[in-house]
Amino acid sequence: MSPWGRDPLDIASVKADFPLLSATQDGKPLVYLDSASSAQKPTYVLDAMEKAYRSQYANVHRGVYRMAEATTAEFERARANVARFIGARDAREVVFTRNATEAINLVAYSWARANLRAGDAVVLTHMEHHANVVPWHILAAERDIELRWIPLTDDYQLDLTDLDRLLDGARLLGVGAMSNVLGTINDVTRLTTAAHAHDALVVVDACQYVPHVATDVHEWDADFVAFSAHKMCGPSGIGALWARAELLEAMPPFMGGGEMIREVRLDGFTTNEIPWKFEAGTPAIVEAIGFGAAVEYLECLGMDAVRDHEMRVTRYALDELSNAFGDSITIYGPRDTSVRGGAVSFLLDGIHAHDVSQVLDEDAVCVRAGHHCAKPLMRILGVPATTRASFYVYNDETDVDALVVALGKTQQFFAP
Amino acid sequence: MAGLEDLYREIILDHYRSPRNRGELDVPPAHKVEGFNPLCGDEVTVYLIVDPATDTVTDIKINGQGCSISQASTSMMSAAVKGKTVDEARALIRAFKALMSIHESKLEGESDGSDLAADLDGVRLGDLEALQGVVKFPVRIKCATLAWNTLQQALDEAGQ
């Protein structure tokens, strides 16, 4: 079913676009509140991928027969869609990767290893996902690079008081545009301005941001932006790295193999043009087509409408959780929805996050429990784990109500 | 479909709310071993004293934080091994893991289908059997076995 030609804010019809959301578990309707981990897929994306497999499939950038050319065109159209979606002016600046993690690793292995020397500093934040921490730990150990950290304020935002001192001598700043734990939206533009004043580049982990907020990489003035399709209604197995063309041109290749070469001889090779220089081997062809379709689906809903809707549901969730559980709930993240997204982390007094998630599952309420791949942040918050309910465009107030009811049952179950 | 009551038996909730043997012991003479479950962030610390003359676990204290299953299992483990000989404690570890469908004979590729009986080998698990329901919730098995793996490490270190 095409998403075009209907009121985009009709959430009942948005829900109906996602076949899995009408599923039941033990006869109870599924309440899916784990989209920060991975989003569900609309029929529009599923159909695009099935159509690719059923009626027009071949490898890309190889065959000269018509079907190969048509598949290549669809694959590259997907790239153009993704570029347009994030405000990129040139589709060649979008490199398909396996996911955002691989995109950040591409920056670490290619750009950073060519440019960073012992004694250089990389600045990160206390709220980074492991994907924007561990690649830099690996590099730091290998090259004697210093890692510095932007701390948090009491209301779960970045404390930029010492930013200039932290950036002194830094070559790179890595920041998540939206925290997958706290929901905090960071002021990327302010950070890129500060970093560039110190001749440091900026890599933005936009995994949690691009699916939820209209994104413009030029407005950010970012250097590298990483994100994943599966969190934005697209398939798993594909993500993207956006980078300014002149950066990509100057970077050495990441992985070697087919597709990324222009010429190979017994004594060496030359690289292909960007972005293919960074796409060794047969890519995730149909996943890319699904990624392109996911972008079309979200564009049709309108990212401003998506953001408005999520702010409303998040506001409702924050209010309802506080009203229902008062002092017995701790919510980790800003209360102001203008500076946060729909990932709501919390703890119920005396009940471990995993036990909460387990009891919620009885009511078919799907939430994430654990450290959310942000162990440094968990340590700073002083908690071993949190429960996280995360909202997307297909969630509404009824999902929040179901969460509150199920949490009430959980509290009763574990009551001393 | 396994129900919550299979997982959260009353005795488990009791150990979670009122853990036994909670505290610390001086190191030395005690051996201290920390166990982590990276998936959940569960943490268990075991303080163990083995009397070399009798090869007996004369004292054990536990600490840590985590989900009800990990903390209840730790409490139940401490109650079960206190006063036991090292051999008895090791037999309990083997039996408990068998209860969790982790069979040492199977790990060695000698499974003949009678693993539980073989590994239990006459060991009485008593209250610990309440944790059997965990098997129906595969992601929680690691929560239940954390204390026992930590105990195993503590016994190994105490025996060195």
Image (cartoon, coloured by chain):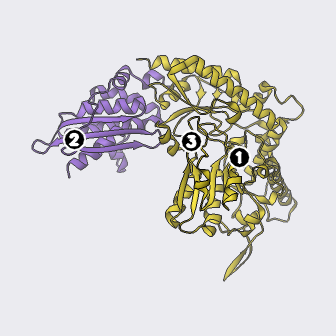
Tally of marks:
3
Mark 2 neighbour density, 10 Å: few (under 14) some (14–19) many (20 or more): few
Give the quarter of the image for residue A68: bottom right
Q: Which residue is mark 2?
A: B26
CA gap between label 2 and label 1 equals 53 Å
Q: Which chain is purple?
A: B
In the image, which lettered chain appears yellow? A
Asked if residue B147 shows in the view, the reply is yes
Residues marked 2 and 1, same chain:
no
Q: Does the residue at mark 3 contact the one at mark 1 (Cβ under 8 Å)?
A: no
Specify the quadrant that holds the C terminus of chain A. top left
Q: Earlier in the sequence, mark 3 or mark 1?
A: 3
- Above or below: residue B116 compared with residue A54: above
Decide if residue B126 is on the left or right side of residue A162.
left
Marks 1 and 2: in contact by CB < 8 Å? no
- The three-letter amino acid code for the residue at tag 3 is Leu
Picture residue at 55% right of the left edge, 21% below the top = A407
Q: Which residue is mark 3?
A: A152
Amino acid carrying mark 2 in the image: Asp
At x 57%, y 44%, the residue is A127
Q: Chain of mark 1?
A: A
Residue that mark 1 sits on: A229
Q: Are marks 3 and 2 in contact (CB under 8 Å)?
A: no
